[in-house]
Amino acid sequence: MSPSKFRPAVAPDQAFLDENAKLLRQIERRGLFKGTLTLGALSMLGGCSSSDMPALQNVLRAISRFNDHVQAWIFDPTRLAPTYPESMVLKPPRYNSFYPPEDVRPLNGETYRLELAGRIAEKQSWTVPQIMALPEQEIIIRHICVEGWDFIGQWSGVSLRLFLERVGADLSCRYVAFRCADGYWGSIDMASALHPQTLLATKYARATIADPFGYPLRLRTAVKLGFKNPKWITSIEVTNDYPSGYWEERGFNWFSGL
Ligand SMILES: Nc1nc2c(c(=O)[nH]1)N[C@H]1C(S)=C(S)[C@@H](COP(=O)(O)O)O[C@H]1N2
Ligand SMILES: [Mo]
């Protein structure tokens, strides 16, 4: 390598931090990361390498877009996120997971069971037909992934609040935790779980949700970033013990929402 091409590892990092100081400050203020914001944490958030500056900038822009997006309604007394006309719905939705779409292992709807655990009175498991028979709510909301993209999606399913009430969950608990068929896991605070725009989604654009997007059951909430919306949910637990999550263990802020 010629000397002119050689740059010590820290140089681009510092340049990047200087160049994006405003975005970084904004993100730090909203507490999207625990501890000090590092390029390592940012790159893990966005699934890119910490030397890939354009990719990192995308991550920053996505987080910033989420901040701007929520800023508009954060002071609204009803605290409902913006919703959109059906004409804006992306079909099919955009895929993301911690592995490529070819590696998605579809679940069998006939043998599928949703298990319940923790502070829930009625812990019988649920079959797909039982879940589909629950009252349905539809939301058309924006999904924002920290990788730097977003889309408008049309999701329907039972309100998580209604479901938790139905199974006798202790709504004074702090957390609702989810386990997924692909080994992914995550959790949200009870206030977000009870938010009127938080669903256990079974449908996208009024049709049964397709395999890559979480068939038969996934979370869709308007009050969290994309990674807080587990797909292929196999168990729901209500607990006071901090449950963390797949990305939280890799440096993401647990709250990542409003
Ligand atoms: N089970 C599971 N759920 C998951 C993920 C995952 O890898 N596995 N990825 C998360 C991330 S980072 C995003 S952005 C959304 C993507 O959902 P989509 O494929 O419907 O766009 O799913 C979230 N839920
Ligand atoms: Mo994501």
Image (spheres, helix red, strand yellow):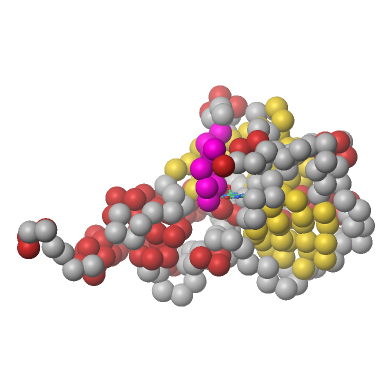
Q: Which residues are magenta?
A: 93-102
Q: Is residue 167 in view from this perspective?
A: yes
Percent coordinates x, y for residue 202 in the rendering: 73, 37
- The image shows residue 141, relative to residue 34, as above or below, that is above
In the image, taking residue 45 as reference, residue 206 lies left or right, namely: right
**Viewer can see residue 75:** no
What residue is shown at x 40% (from left), y 61% (from top)? 42
Residue at 38%, 66% in the rendered image: 40
* Left or right: residue 155 compared with residue 68: right
- The secondary structure that most of the magenta stretch takes on is loop
| Residue 35 within the segment the image draws in magenta | no
In the rendered view, does 27 fall on the left or right side of 241? left
**Is 15 placed left or right of 31 in the picture?**
left
Q: Where in the figure is residue 215, as x and y percent of width and height?
A: 70, 38
Count numbered badges in the picture.
0
The image quadrant where one finds the N terminus is: bottom left
Identified at 57% across, 42% down, the residue is: 103
Q: State the residue at coordinates (49%, 67%).
A: 251
* Image vertical order of residue 243 relative to residue 154, above or below: below
Q: Residue 249 or 254: which is nearer the viewer?
A: 249
Percent across and percent down for residue 72 are: 51, 49
Is 75 in front, or is 60? 60
Which quadrant does the C terminus fall into? bottom right
Residue 182 point in image, percent of width and height: 65, 50
